[in-house]
Image (cartoon, rainbow, N blue to C red):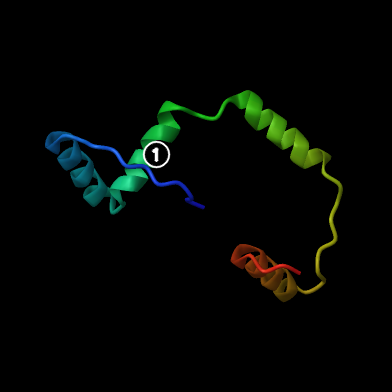
Amino acid sequence: MLTRRLQMLLDDRRYRRLQAEARARRASVGALVREAIDRSYPVSSERKRAAAKAILAAPPMRLPDDIRDLVAELDEIRAGVKR
């Protein structure tokens, strides 16, 4: 989920390059900037390892018997509805 706005200035040449590449890939300029950030500043493997370890150590959780109930619960969470 995108939650932060970034405003930056570019010269015309750089912006035209981004715009042309975005058009060629059928993506947004913002998507290209995010991709460039991810490639230039990857999440460290140590952080990934720690996150995986935490997920694997988490206790099992109860899941609804009916998938429709699970989908409804996830929709409520995304919408910010309190149970």
**30, 64: nearer the viewer:** 30
Q: Residue at 60%, 67% (x, y): give it.
A: 79
Quarter of the image with the C terminus in it: bottom right
Q: Crowdedness of circle 1 by 10 Å Cα count: few (<14), some, many (20+)?
A: few
Q: Residue at x 16, y 34 (%)?
A: 11
Q: Is residue 49 above or below residue 20?
A: above
Above-or-below relation of 28 to 76: above
Question: Which residue position is annotated with label 1?
Answer: 35
Q: Is residue 58 left or right of residue 4?
A: right
Q: Quadrant of residue 39?
A: top left
Residue 25 horizontal/vertical position (percent): 28, 49
Q: Secondary structure at mark 1?
A: helix
- The residue at the point 71 percent across, 30 percent down is 50
Find residue 24 and report its horizontal and vertical position in percent: 23, 49
Left-right relation of 62 to 37:
right
Image position of 56 (left or right of 10): right
Amino acid type, mark 1: Glu
**Residue in the image at 86% along x and 51% along y:** 60
